Amino acid sequence: MNQQIVSNSIREFSQYNRVLEGNKRYVEKKLTTDDQYFKKLSTGQSPKYLLIGCSDSRAPPNELTETDPGEIFIHRNIANLVIPTDLNLNCVIQYAVEHLNIHSIIVMGHTCCGGIKAAMAQESVGGLLDLWLNQIKIVYEKHQDLIESLENEEDRLDCLSQLNVRAQVMNIWKNPIIQKSWQKGNPIMVHGWLFRVETGYIEELLIDSQTPYEMNKVFALKFKLDSERILSKQTTPLGSPKNNARKRFQFMQKKIIQHIKQQKENTSRIEKISDLQQISELIQNCQEL
């Protein structure tokens, strides 16, 4: 028994070590084509896409899209879910939109998904996992008639995988961070993908571009943008110190106008000069307020 455990441990360590050796080969390969590759990579990132995918080890986004590090900002979880209360995901979305200035968000599901299959079953997979998969069960419940009309189990799984991606795309449209970006004039586009494990190809799901405009108005939030906040700060209530100063300024302006009228009525040059001096003093007093 102990010998078997030792044998298994050696085998596992060899596999673990193979991963580290793979990294060395990867570095050598990159440096062969560009000896400054990693120095350039260390200067920063400017991805144009945020991809929300499944944690499944068979669906690595960079490898599937033949993109290099720095091109796609990636968040992965079980069954590529966009849960409104997921702080981890919302932080990723906010950073991607407000700091990396990405222009597209992609939700990528895949066929043969264990999360989708578990959600369709009634057997418990564990407390936290059951709670997580409830989000997929809600999608199933909404489209139950359509899914159950399919005879083949693989077709039902495939159908739920697609419907799940569409549901998560809608959750992104409802996200306040995305809506605020649209109102500020930065329309983030949202796409739905289905990676077919059995073929290796990515299928782009047809999602209506009018979706953000057609969702229930209760989800359409209105934001007070920075420019509006500045304007509201400049508008002060009656009785405030700033408003009282404005009243004194207006009173001073009236006095200046009165002196100008008096000046026109006076034909004496000396008196004109005297009045002008008074006006100058009033203007100076006004500026000091």
Image (cartoon, rainbow, N blue to C red):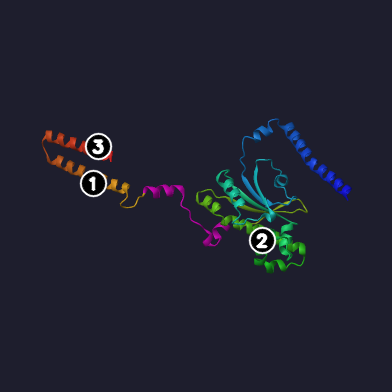
The amino acid type of the residue labelled 2 equals Leu
Identify which residue is drawn at 50% across, 51% down: 183
Residue under label 1: 251
* Image location of residue 121, percent across then percent down: 73, 65
Nearer mark to the viewer, of 2 and 1: 2
Label 3 environment density (alpha carbons within 10 Å; few <14, some 14–19, many ≥20) = few
Crowdedness of circle 1 by 10 Å Cα count: few (<14), some, many (20+)?
Answer: few
72 is higher (above) or lower (below) than 114: above
- Please name the residue shown 66% across and 61% down the image: 131
Q: Nearer the viewer, residue 263 or 133?
A: 133
Q: Quadrant of the C terminus?
A: top left
Tag 1: amino acid:
Phe
> Which residue does the numbered mark 3 point to in the structure image?
284
Q: Which stretch is magenta?
A: 209-234
Helix, strand or loop at mark 1 = helix
Identity of the amino acid at label 3?
Gln
- Measured along the vertical axis of the image, is residue 46 above or below residue 90? above
Circle 2 or circle 3, nearest the eye: 2
Q: Separation of disc 2 and disc 1 at Cα?
A: 68 Å
- Classified by dominant secondary structure, the portion drawn in magenta counts as helix
Quadrant of residue 267 within the rendered picture: top left
**Which residue position is annotated with label 2?**
131
